[in-house]
Image (spheres, rainbow, N blue to C red):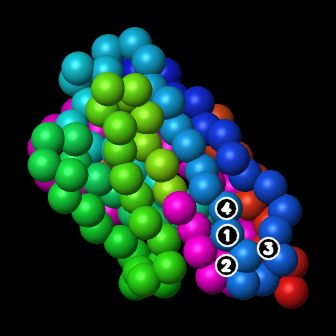
Amino acid sequence: QVQLVESGGGLVQAGGSLRLSCTASGRTYSVNVMGWFRQAPGKEREFAAAITRSRGSTSYADSVKGRFAITADNAKNTVYLQMNSLKPEDTAVYYCAARAPYGIMWSAQAYNDWGQGTQVTVSS
């Protein structure tokens, strides 16, 4: 099992930036993909971005493409989500997730382990 701990959420004005961090511990050698999902009140959890640990390949949801950037520091077992040009509709709880099989997937069901989430609130 892999334990994931997120940090970096908070309150920011529209147009501002935040950087989320997620540090993994435990069986990190089994992780091949790290992802960020988000869930707004009354909505389903949705994919935001993901990165492969071996090649650093990335994938982004259309809603965040060009504004968010996911990076990884494998030596620290940490993945980051740099969020720029934030909008009120980005307000959500952001979750870090880990996936053992190779290949980036956008479905939350494809991820094995999850963090507790961190709140991001963007005011207009």
Is residue 101 left or right of 83 when viewed as pictured?
A: left
Measure the alpha-carbon separation of dots 4 and 1.
4 Å
Q: Residue at x 43, y 43 (%)?
A: 79
Are the residues at dot 4 and dot 2 in contact (C-beta closer than 8 Å)?
A: yes
Location of the C terminus (image quadrant): bottom right
Residue extent of the magenta highlight:
82-108
Measure the alpha-carbon separation of dots 3 and 1.
10 Å
The residue pinned by badge 1 equals: 17
Mark toward the viewer: 4 or 3 = 4
Q: Residue at the top extreme?
A: 26
Measure the alpha-carbon separation of dots 4 and 2.
8 Å
Are the residues at dot 2 and dot 1 in contact (C-beta closer than 8 Å)?
A: yes
Q: Secondary structure at mark 3?
A: strand
Q: Amino acid at mark 3?
A: Val
| Vertical arrangement, residue 86 with respect to residue 41, above or below | below
Dot 4 surroundings within 10 Å: few (below 14), some, or many (20 or more)?
Answer: some
Q: Residue at x 21, y 52 (%)?
A: 56
Q: Which of the two discs, 2 and 1, labels the residue nearer the N terminus?
A: 1
Are the residues at dot 4 and dot 3 in contact (C-beta closer than 8 Å)?
A: no
Dot 3 surroundings within 10 Å: few (below 14), some, or many (20 or more)?
Answer: many
The residue pinned by badge 2 equals: 86
| Number of the label disc, if any, that sits on residue 122 | 3
Question: Is residue 58 magenta-colored?
Answer: no
The residue pinned by badge 4 equals: 18
Are the residues at dot 2 and dot 3 in contact (C-beta closer than 8 Å)?
A: yes
Residue 60: quadrant of the picture:
bottom left
Q: Amino acid at mark 1?
A: Ser
| Vertical arrangement, residue 121 with respect to residue 102, above or below | below
